[in-house]
Image: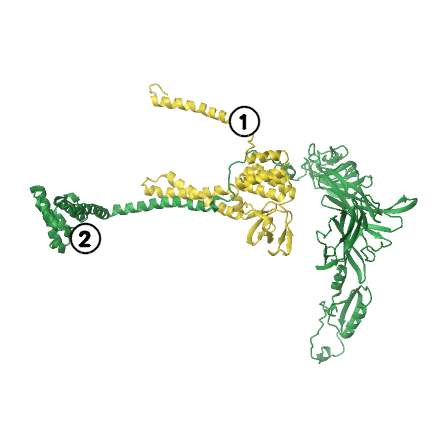
Chain colours: A green, B yellow
Amino acid sequence: MTKSEIRNPKEARNPKSEVPPTRRRLRASDFGFVSAFGFRASDLYLTLLFLITSLPALAQQLTISNQGGSFIIQGQGVIRLGPGGQLIDPQVAAAMQMSGADQPALAQAEFDPPTLAVGQTGTYRVVVTAMTEAAGVPAKLPAPAGLEMEPTGRAFAYGNGPMGIQPRTTFNFRVRPTAAGQFTLPAYDASANAKPVTVAPATLRVLPQGTTVPPSRLRLLAQAPTNDFYVGELIPIRLRLFDSGDGTVAGFGQAQVSGDAFVVDQSLMRYRRDARVENGRVVGDMVADLAVTPVKEGRLALRAQALASLFRPPAANGITLPGYQPLVDAEPVMVNVKRLPTEGRPASFAGAIGTFDFESVSALPGGGRAGEPLTLAVTVRGVGNIHRLVPPKVGWVKGWQVFAPVSGASTPAMDGQPGMASFSYTMIPLNNSVKATPEIPFSYFNPASGDYVELPIPPVPILVVGGADVPVVQMAPPSATDDEDAEPELKFAEVMRSPGATATLTPVQARGWFLLLQLVPALALGGLWWWDRRRRYLADHPDVVARARARRALRRELGRLRRAGRARDGKAFVESAARGFQQAAAPFTRANPAALVAADVLGALPAGERDGEVGRLVRQVFGAGDRLHFLDQAGEGAAVLEARAKVEGVLEQWKERL
Amino acid sequence: MTQGEVRSPKSEVRRKSEARIPKAFLLVCLLGASLSFAAPAPDVSTPFARGFQEYQVGGYTLAAETFGEVSRKQPSVGAFFNLGNAQWQDGEKGEAILAWERAQWLSPRNAEVRNNLAFARKQSQINAPELAWYEVCSTWLPPGAWGWLSAGSFWLALALVLLPGIFRWRRNDWQQAGAAASLAVFLLTTPALVGVATRAKLGVVRVPEPSLLLTPTREGQSLLRLSAGEVARQIGQRGDYVRVRTGSDLEGWLRREEFALVSQAR
């Protein structure tokens, strides 16, 4: 790029806008699209949108952008106005229309056929114009007495409503009258989009048993083989929607089997029209061939249903929705399903049921050097659940490194025609001693013979060249403990013959008595500890022991003293008083109480008392005692008895001091 | 015995008695074995034996009622195990797993109970509850055994520390070792006791596919459909509802009758 020859002043190159900056109400991205879903538009814009929405059943995807103040509308979309006149986002509006949320919900019901005889069965059909997730009917309908009603299933389809497409959910109930008469199922509330919607009353006329009544124009027949089946085996089912001969039936769809005992394989479902001669006329029944797999054992009721499309709508009975597709029930078909035998089941059995054989087993390339991978391609052909065939795993093989199998294309077996399944293994020969691919165990269960058939994938000869072993670390052969396939099969343990020891679910530590029980060792150990501490204290403080002993002895002598005083026994009184003084003085002298004399007792007294009244009383008692003991002077006791109160008071005082 | 040694009469008596012990032991063993082999048929007069017979003839509903009565009056491993078997055969998966969980609570090492629980979980596609390490430890012994072991080891350790001082026994190595060992046992039992306490909050969903509600109200929003036999932890309760945490760490409310604790038989 050359330098510009034109002088361009800076102001001209980058002019500043004289217009004051205004806040743009509709923020647009760099690409020119509105960056939010909310519309902030002019009156012209609203008018234009209103005109578009006024067109019937218009479904357009519009993109509206604001570029320099002009609106651009392009593409297709749905534009709706809300209840308050506000615009609704086109995507929200489309979703509302698809779900029927923008339309008033309806619920209609009918008995099909409207007339039955006692013992016959019919169908009570309810249609709610809402998505199947948003539609509901009561689990128990207000059926009048004499009318047994049992829910059989539901189906969903779109139809054309007054405001465009209309979601329709159909609920079917099997009806069996037990008495003749006219039965009216009263109005009740169903639910649509979380709002109640009233189902109009429906009337069924029931004639006495044996009366011939015209059957329903819609008759679905389910046919299944009558032989026994095994759990996991593919059962071919044929559903036939009869054409009444007037060309009413246009087609049918959504063939289904209700209940949790069967799994329907949608990939094997085929619809066709089958010509049949009735009353000399050729009519075209609709036929659906499907395959179900039982997942339970026992005698199972297979209940099938399908939505019928009609060329001509039936006469108004109760459901008047235009283009309505009724859900038709077939009579249940009983199927006997047995469990696969456990006896003789090979370890390689992986659920293949039918009759199978190998169409081709090839190794590509057929030779090579050790360490170079080759592909073992296997094609199995047979009748049964071949489209669900699980390629057999390969365990540890000496001299080989084998990778997990990879499933290839498969063709289901239908109408008795065999199907095919292919899978392949990537294998690496680890040395030149291997001459063929390993034999891979495979087995299947043959329901016709009722036994397992082992059909190992045969070895394919290969040529491996190369002198030495490939430096590939081959894993050690798996032991029984780390092989997940070697997991022991769990078997149900039967009942015990004895109950065992009685126990409680609440553990002892959560019980109050257990916590209280802990007080026993706590108190025992605490008591022992306290006793030991007391013992040690007393051993360190012998005066405490002596005082306690003196208190006890003094209490004893005081008792004797009082008894002697009451008995006016002077001698006994004096002796008790003397012994009391001895006991009281003993802790202070640390001597044997019996060895104390008056001087010792006086020595134990405080200095003030020794020379006072107490000292005199002590001397009197001990003097009287000596005289009584050595001189046998009985009158001495009487003199001391006179001072009985004082003696007792002194001894009480001493006891307190101890 | 070497020459010149004199065999004392006392030692002679002991030798003879020692020689008699194996014979006596053998006799006791033989007697025990014969008694065990010749055990009489179960007495049908007991409710347990009656339930056993009802189960054997295929009366699973009746057997479940009988074993349920037995497990209420005299709870035992056998009663709960057989109750679970009868309920399983009767199609009550949630109740069966609850009964087996209770049997395992009482006897965590019982192989038959473990087997049937694993069998039921495999059949019902239900995961076993995830336990914390201390809860796993607590499953090594019955819950009550941890209480006795913990209390016994604690008091034994305390006694071995205190009693020699109190009774002026000479301190021995075995006393010290015993005290240390007891204290170690006590400390080791503590996590297990915590595990028992937290496991006591485990419960089983009894009914098929109850709704796990966001709020404990009748009109509560359903968060999830649980499976019968699924194990959850109770973390609260209010009125007729219990707050539980499922194995997928989702919390919500279940009605009381839909959930039962393993450790509490109502």
The x, y position of residue A459, in whole percent, is: 74, 34
Based on the displayed image, in which of its 4 quarters is residue B151 positioned? top left
Where does label 2 land, which residue? A653
For the point 72% across and 53% down, which residue is it?
A142
The x, y position of residue B195, in whole percent, is: 51, 47
For the point 77% across and 34% down, which residue is it?
A448
How far apart marks 1 and 2 lie (CA) works out to 84 Å
Parent chain of label 2 = A
The x, y position of residue A606, in whole percent, is: 15, 54
Where does label 1 land, which residue? B37
**Count of picture labels:** 2
Question: Would you say B33 lies left or right of A572 here?
Answer: right
Which SS class for mark 1? helix
Which SS class for mark 2? helix
Parent chain of label 1 = B
Camera sees residue B85: no
Q: Specify the farthest residue to the bottom.
A: A18
